Image (cartoon, coloured by chain):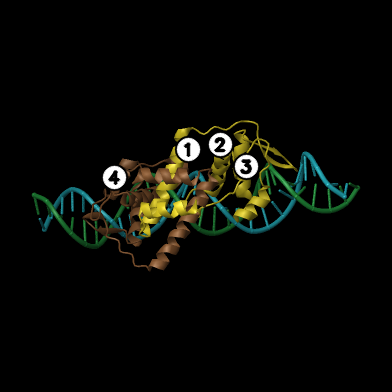
Chain colours: A brown, B yellow, C cyan, D green
DNA sequence: ATCTTTGTACTATACTTATAGTACAATAAT
DNA sequence: ATTATTGTACTATAAGTATAGTACAAAGAT
């Protein structure tokens, strides 16, 4: 399972925070393939947001093929398969990391601080 | 000086990203007392946003007494020393790292792959 | 069959965010 | 004095976000 938490102070939309937390939950292993997520209504009550806000997050993740929904049953973590060449992978990784570090820099963080934080997330 | 960078994917409003980066820039020493910030028009062009968006960010920081503006001259970092608590810094770093590890994961990369790539950038 | 639970799909409203455009006021340089 | 540059202050418009409310359809349990 996963413990959701919304922070209104950040300015990041709620539905997007939900999306991020599901994705990150998967990345860190807290959410596993096939696992059921809370129902849209249950999570809406839990997070004190509207049903539509949760539904929007789930919907977007379903479009991205990250979640699978069964009407009447629930929403589940899908099995993701990605097919890209090693060359493309390497290029994409560099691209992501460049963007990553440049954003971190704009907040005054060093690469070492980032690496340390990422180590903790493992 | 400081290198601003906006990320539209996060959903965090542009004016808020600008505010954050100025505050963190001051806290980390990348922006010093008395230093002049880019003009609203120059930064707007640089970041490819509207003049009003930058003005909104500067205005809010002026209300917070963090910036001092001299019409016709420019906008400057005020004498006030801004302190961002370790907790806040940590939170921001986590926020940034969470987002990026999620992105990396959605491309099929592990946290280790990201760390290795970042090590090379040092 | 009926009921409950699930996700889905609307309408309507309000607020926030971003843009475009225009104009004005204060300062500095000429 | 004139000009250029600066921040400020508007209006108007569009898009995004969140809420409330309602209704429907699919699946499961009884």
Tag 4 subunit: A
Q: Within 10 angstroms of label 4, few (less than 14), some, or many (20 or more) residues? A: few
Q: Is residue A107 above or below residue A81?
A: above
Instruction: Tell me where residue A36 appears, x and y as whole percent.
Output: 24, 51
Tag 3 subunit: B
- Foreground tag (1 vs 3): 1
Q: Nearer the viewer, residue B115 or C9?
A: B115
Measure the C-alpha gap from mark 2 to mark 1: 9 Å
Instruction: Tell me where residue A81 appears, x and y as whole percent.
Output: 30, 64
Measure the C-alpha gap from mark 4 to mark 3: 38 Å
Q: Nearer the viewer, residue B112 or B10?
A: B112
Q: Is residue B101 above or below residue D9?
A: below
Measure the C-alpha gap from mark 2 to mark 4: 33 Å
Contact flag, marks 2 and 1 (Cβ < 8 Å): yes
Read off the residue under disc 3.
Answer: B58
Residue B89 disc label:
1
């Amino acid at each position: 399972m996963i413990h959701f938490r919304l922070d209104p102070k950040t300015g990041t939309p709620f539905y997007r925070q939900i999306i991020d937390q599901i994705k990150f939950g998967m990345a860190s292993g807290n959410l596993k393939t096939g696992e059921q997520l809370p129902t849209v209504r249950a999570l809406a009550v839990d997070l004190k947001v509207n049903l539509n806000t949760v539904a929007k997050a789930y919907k977007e993740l379903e479009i991205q093929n990250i979640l699978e929904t069964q009407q009447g049953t629930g929403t589940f973590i899908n099995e993701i398969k990605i097919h890209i060449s090693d060359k493309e992978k390497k290029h994409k990784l560099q691209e992501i990391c460049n963007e990553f570090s440049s954003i971190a820099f704009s907040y005054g963080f060093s690469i070492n601080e980032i690496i340390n934080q990422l180590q903790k997330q493992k």
